[in-house]
Amino acid sequence: MKTGDKHYNNYGGWLRQKFDGQQVFKVTVDAGFTCPNRDGSKGFGGCTYCNVDSFTPALTRQHETIREQVEKSMERARKVYRAEKFIVYFQPNTNTYSDVDTLRKLYDEALAVNPSETVGLSVGTRADCLDDEKLAMFDEYADKLAIDLEIGMESMYDTSLQSLNRGHTHQEFLDLMDKCHNRKFDLCVHTIFGLPGETHEMMLAVADELNRLPIRFAKLHHLYIVKGSVMGVRYRRDPDSIPLFTLEGYTDFLCEFIPKLRPDLVIQRLFGISDREYHLAPHWQKSKRDIQLHLERAFKERGIFQGAEYAIPQPL
Ligand code: SF4
């Protein structure tokens, strides 16, 4: 896989290669799911860092039906980003938290809006909400479309998962990964750096963990605090109780982390950011685009390349 001039294997480049240079854009759908650690089946309140509204586009929140959400988002993406093709992205909450018949109905409704320009389906979910029947369903969808399941790993340490109120262990995540070898769909793993109690070495070890998983994509995030989350309440009461990355600190960390990553792993995101109305901290005083440029410039100036220190992993 060519990484272009970015020094890391970036998602934009991967999309252009896969879809013959066309502008492919993700359109977000909120199908009204909840999460097992929110509705009481595994816990209440959701993950402590999460407020789903903070990462659901305002346009999606304004429209009730799936059809309206998809139509309006596509319309906007054509105008603003000159999008030519679309990936329908079921993003907020746990988008496999129902039975297979219901899931099919919801996905099909979104995919039917503009089938000629829809090239993929991306589904955000959790490792404990995917069973064999659902995995087989996604294999079927993958006969026709590019499918990726986005799974939150967040941390590889159970103490962190417990304090985040994730409601599952790292072993449950690994058990799912085991079931996903040789599937037709792709996997994207989401991880957060800077969680309370995790040392620099613990975070660097995540590279080896990602390298040994059967995944094509990774989304890397630094911890940020949003209004309306449990952490948001804690942070407002006592900001010193949750130390957060500065931009320079995170840049230094990524410059150590990225070279350890498998060179074929496609990075969908290098950092996280929420809408201004929800964002509490850290304040890096830069736009999303400027943070992206800052990180990419640092990779170039410091001669950082994804995979430069990649170590062949031991089997799971
Ligand atoms: S982070 Fe994901 S699993 Fe956790 S509460 Fe938010 S949407 Fe649900």
Image (cartoon, grey):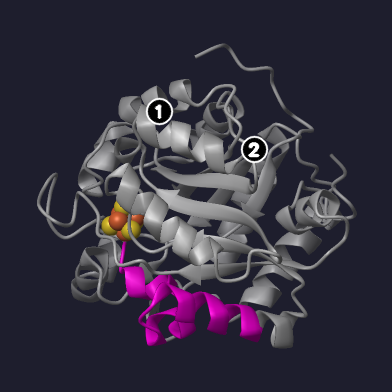
Residue 307 or residue 266, whichever sits in front: 266
Does the rendering let one see residue 193? no
Decide if residue 173 is on the left or right side of residue 287: left
Residue 116 or residue 139, whichever sits in front: 116
Query: Measured along the vertical axis of the image, is residue 268 above or below residue 75?
Result: above
Question: Over which residues does the magenta segment extend?
Answer: 50-76
Q: Residues within 10 Å of mark 1 (few under 14, many from 20)?
A: some
Q: Using the rendered view, name the quadrant where residue 229 is placed.
A: bottom left
Does the rendering let one see residue 191? yes
Decide if residue 191 is on the left or right side of residue 99: right
Mark 1 secondary-structure assignment: helix
- Mark closer to the chain start, 2 or 1: 1
Query: Measured along the vertical axis of the image, is residue 168 above or below residue 248?
Result: above
Q: Is residue 62 magenta?
A: yes
Mark 2 secondary-structure assignment: loop
Q: Main secondary structure of the magenta part?
A: helix
Decide if residue 201 is on the left or right side of residue 261: left
Q: Would the CB of label 2 be found within 8 Å of ligand 1?
A: no
Q: Residue at x 68, y 33 (%)?
A: 260
Decide if residue 69 is on the left or right side of residue 54: right
Q: Position of residue 221 (x, y in %)?
A: 51, 55
Q: Which residue is mark 1?
A: 176
Q: Amino acid at mark 2?
A: Arg
Query: Measured along the vertical axis of the image, is residue 224 above or below residue 43?
Result: below
Query: Measured along the vertical axis of the image, is residue 36 above or below residue 75?
Result: above
Q: Tell me the number on the disc at residue 58.
A: none
* Quarter of the figure that contains the N terminus: top right
The alpha-carbon separation of the residues under discs 2 and 1 comes to 15 Å
Q: Which residue is mark 2?
A: 216
For ligand 1, which image quadrant applies?
bottom left
